[in-house]
Each structure stands twice: as C-alpha cells, then as structure tokens.
Amino acid sequence: KQEVTQIPAALSVPEGENLVLNCSFTDSAIYNLQWFRQDPGKGLTSLLLIQSSQREQTSGRLNASLDKSSGRSTLYIAASQPGDSATYLCAGVGGFQKLVFGTGTRLLVSP
Amino acid sequence: KAGVTQTPRYLIKTRGQQVTLSCSPISGHRSVSWYQQTPGQGLQFLFEYFSETQRNKGNFPGRFSGRQFSNSRSEMNVSTLELGDSALYLCASSLSGGRAMNTEAFFGQGTRLTVV
C-alpha cells in the first residue's frame, strides 16, 4: 500500500527566502509524481507533474525533482513571496490515475 | 479553456438522506476521478471513470457510488448519509488513457458537503 509523507508539516519563512519541501513515498512503482497547492477552502492547483522517466521539472520559480529509487521528491521554491502561502501537496500517481496524497506542508511567507 | 466545474459548491443535508454531486471535466478529458478531503484523513481516492467505465475504486463503503456519461461528465452519489461524510469532495479530470498512461490531473473547486 502506497504511503506518502511530507516534511515539514508547517513552515514559516520571511519573504525572499529559498525553500525546499520534501515528499517521500513507500512504493517506487508509481508512474508519475504531481505537486499541487491548495488555498484555504479551495480546490487543488496543479504545479508540476514529473513523469517516472524524468528526474526533474521546472516552472518559473518552482523546481521539482524525483528520485524513484530512494522514494523521494523535493519541491524547491525560489525567492518566496507572500502569495506563495498555501498548503503544498505531493501525490504519487498509480495505475488508472489513482493519486495517493501526502498530508501536506502548510507554508506561510511573511512580508 | 474552461476548467473543471463542480456543482453545487455547498450542500447541507440531514443524516439518512442521499446526495448527488456533479463534475464536468475539461473539454477533451475522458478520465474523471473523485476524492474526499477531511481534516482527519486528508485526501482519499474514491473512484475513477474513463469512457463511462469505472477502472479503479478506493476503499469506501458501497454507499458511495458514481457514474460517467457519454459526454464525460460524472456524478457521484452518497446514500444514507452519515455525519462522518461531511467533507470537501473534489473531482479531477485528465486526458489519461491506459493503465500506465497517467497524465496531469486538474481539480475542480470542490463541493463542501455538511451532514447535520
């Protein structure tokens, strides 16, 4: 059974800092790994999808890496801004689009 | 391009009633998945439909059911509601394809169900 863990559970940083969010999964037989952000009371916004054949993906100030052999993924956020404050979720994608989510990292970026 | 649309956004129901939630996927997407989000359990997979067929199912009781129509729109139904069914129900759509052809999932804003 796939289990996904995210560390840290919460993070508070001043604006401008670079930060790393961690995601680990127990079953390396995932097909893809996807990172999302969720604002309070809202749905999920897709940030990055890393396919199993890839090692990393970049979008703007975001960079995500995937190491299937060690069961880890990291999301790097450069030059953080207050608008980045949200909960960040990673999900291992199994067969037939089944996403197994971590518990999330609550990020607060202070001006 | 319109995103994933879920209706209604909010629902209040009484224990024992049933409820139907609707999800319209992004145009061209044939896979629709449903998730339940609660503070205690986080995001849990309910089921996935592709071309009107359920391909995958999570570990939920039979009170939770779904279907998909020929236009890819999907509904989920919860019968005999319990207090513990109060949650945010999220729908995701993707292009998908075969078992291993998993593509980026896009989520709707969710339906907030409160059971009293």
Image: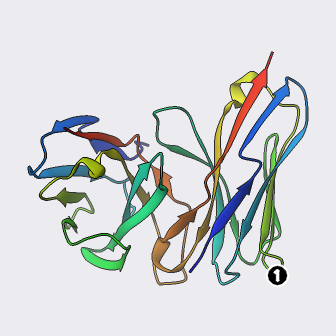
Instruction: Place residue A87 in its image quadrant.
Output: top right
Hey, which residue is sitting farthest left in the picture?
Answer: B17
Instruction: Place residue A101 in its image quadrant.
Output: bottom right
Relative to A78, say whether B20 is above or below.
Answer: below
Quarter in which the C terminus of chain B is drawn:
top left
Q: Which residue is mark 1?
A: A69
Relative to B47, say whether A57 is above or below.
Answer: above
Query: Which colour style is shown?
Result: rainbow
Give the camera-side residue of B53 and A27.
Answer: A27
Hey, which residue is sitting farthest right in the picture?
Answer: A17
Question: Can residue B30 be spotted in the picture?
Answer: no
Quarter in which the N terminus of chain B is drawn:
top left
Q: Residue at x 48, y 84 (%)?
A: B99
Q: Is residue B20 left or right of residue B73?
A: left
Q: Is residue B101 left or right of residue B47?
A: right
Give the camera-side residue of B28 and B90.
Answer: B90
Q: Position of residue A60 (x, y in %)?
A: 79, 41
